């Protein structure tokens, strides 16, 4: 029963993320995706015209960058192709398609984009064929990589939890000391005001 559930989860985990969206002429659309460090990412894209009668292809540029605006992939005439990269640090990537056209077509274009990460990038059928593995052995190899990927995800989540906890504790400590400083400052200011008023009233002989 456990093995069956594991295989079902494996199929769900290995399903690549894909999306279709409409791209107007002279418009830029961007997508963001979180990617873990040291994980292979493979993207595939296909740009087609909605107006089949228009033989002129809508010029489209593709640009993939990380959070620091480092270029991971760049294609000036993106029609159909793929790109790949590996991040050194976990973070968000931005995938942008920008259509630039000197003429105004009746219709824009449709962009199909597929993103595969980690285990999803491996072709287990080819690996099984090269290693001469039986179908069940191939499934077991996929399951092993799947479990390893899940463990890595949990480890990364734990590291983030610890980092956030440390940040929260540091923030609490700073707020505590800042509160003490503000209270001390207000107390000193109030004491100074009392001393000043007492001396002022004495000078006016309002009090002894």
Image (cartoon, helix red, strand yellow):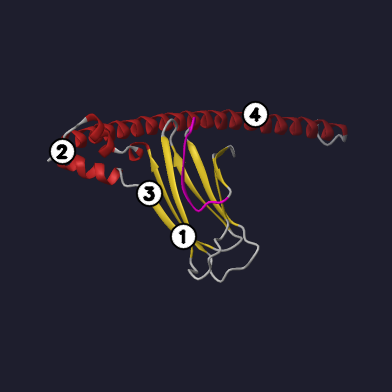
Residue nearest the observer in this picture, 78 or 33: 78
Q: Which residue is mark 4?
A: 184
Is residue 58 positioned above or below 43 on the image? below
Residue shown at the point (55%, 30%) measured from the top left? 176
- Structural crowding at the residue carrying mark 1, measured as other residues with C-alpha within 10 Å and reported as few (<14), some (14–19) or many (≥20): few
x%, y% of residue 95? Answer: 51, 47
Quadrant of res 188: top right
N-terminal of the pair, mark 4 or mark 3, is: 3
Q: Is residue 64 magenta?
A: no
In the visual, does 105 lie left or right of 206? Answer: left
Is residue 97 positioned above or below 74 on the image? below
Q: Which residue is mark 3?
A: 17
> Which region shows up in magenta?
77-89
Q: Which residue is mark 2?
A: 3
N-terminal of the pair, mark 1 or mark 4, is: 1
Closer to viewer: mark 3 or mark 2: 3
x%, y% of residue 144? Answer: 24, 31
- Structural crowding at the residue carrying mark 3, measured as other residues with C-alpha within 10 Å and reported as few (<14), some (14–19) or many (≥20): few
């Amino acid at each position: 029963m456990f093995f069956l559930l594991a295989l079902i989860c494996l199929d769900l985990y290995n399903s690549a993320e894909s999306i279709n969206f409409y791209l107007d002429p002279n418009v830029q659309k961007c997508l963001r995706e979180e990617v873990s460090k040291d994980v292979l990412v493979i993207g595939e894209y296909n740009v087609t015209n909605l107006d089949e009668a228009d033989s002129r292809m809508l010029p489209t540029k593709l640009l993939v960058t990380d959070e620091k605006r480092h270029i991971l992939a760049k294609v000036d005439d993106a029609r159909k192709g793929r790109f790949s990269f590996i991040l050194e640090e976990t973070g968000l990537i931005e995938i942008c398609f920008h259509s630039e056209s000197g003429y105004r077509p009746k219709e824009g274009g449709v962009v199909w984009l597929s993103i595969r990460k980690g285990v999803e990038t491996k072709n287990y059928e080819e690996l099984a064929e090269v290693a001469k593995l039986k179908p069940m052995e191939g499934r077991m190899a996929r399951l092993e990589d799947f479990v390893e990927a899940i463990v890595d995800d949990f480890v990364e989540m734990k590291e983030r939890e610890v980092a956030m906890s440390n940040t929260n504790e540091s923030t609490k400590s700073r707020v505590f000391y800042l509160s003490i400083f503000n209270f001390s400052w207000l107390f000193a200011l109030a004491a100074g005001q009392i001393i000043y008023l007492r001396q002022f009233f004495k000078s006016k002989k309002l009090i002894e």
